[in-house]
Amino acid sequence: MIIKSKKIRLELNNKQRTMALQHAGVARHAYNWGLDVCLEAFKNKEKMPSSIDLHKKLVAEVKKENPWYYESSKCAPQEALRNLDMGYKNFHRLQKKHDYKKIKEIKKNGVVVGKVFEGLPKYKKRGVNESFFLEDPNFLHVNNNKIKVPRIGWLKCSEVLPEGIKIKNVTISRRADDWFVSFYWKSEKANTEKTKEEN
């Protein structure tokens, strides 16, 4: 059995583009909020919250004050916080090797204006590497050149999708004005085709 992956350009209508932007915005907001919490804990030398801790705090404090969170799938902020958690784990692994002394200088016009720990997670900006994650193996389906995802529904793809595959999750991302869907599936048959295809 081999793992295969695919990244395909989506052909979204205006309503779907709006929903995709909403999901990406929720993911970005959750990530940046979580980063604020983690930076404060790091600054105060407190125990770093896990993605589970952050999500509980998000539900209790943030979603209540921002009802627009409920317009998007709960998977988007959950995965964003998991990615933040992984980013901090990678940062701590890097810094531990250097006894937390690996510093990166911030320069502006050739002049050092600040210093930060190298590898420290950064805030996400609107319109830059926007993406979100959706997961629901009972809901995700493919049919010819369409893929069905939670909340948004059937999305038209720029090419025909592989037949008979089962998908557990997808990542939808934006590059310039184009949206793409990426997913993995297990294949019982090995062949001469590439195991990873990217457009």
Image: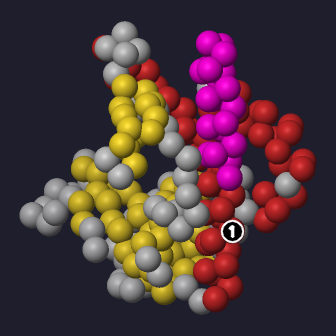
Q: How is the image coloured?
A: secondary structure
Taking the spot 49% from the left edge, 63% from the top edge, the residue there is 128
Task: Specify the amino acid type for callout 1.
Answer: Gln
| Viewer-proximal residue among 135 and 198 | 198
Q: Is residue 68 left or right of residue 21?
A: right
Instruction: Please say if 1 is above or below 12.
Output: above
Residue 145 is inside the magenta segment: no
Residue sticking out furthest to the top: 99
Hey, which quadrant is residue 155 in on the image? bottom right
- Chief secondary structure of the magenta portion: helix
Instruction: State the count of labels.
Output: 1
Residue at the image position 68 percent from the left and 85 percent from the top: 15
What's the residue at 32%, 60% (across, down)?
5
| Nearest to the observer: residue 106 or residue 159 | 106
Q: Is residue 170 left or right of residue 108?
A: right
Classify the position of the C terminus by image quarter. bottom left
Most extreme residue toward the left, as rendered? 192
The picture places residue 89, in percent across and down from the top left corner, at 46, 26
Q: Residues within 10 Å of mark 1 (few under 14, many from 20)?
A: some
- 165 lies above or below 98: below
Residue located at (62% from left, 54% from top): 28
Give the extent of the magenta segment: 29-49
Q: Which residue is mark 1?
A: 22
* Nearest to the observer: residue 143 or residue 176: 176
Residue 27 drawn at (x, y percent): 63, 54
Tell me: residue 119, above or below residue 166. above
- Residue 31 is covered by the magenta coloring: yes
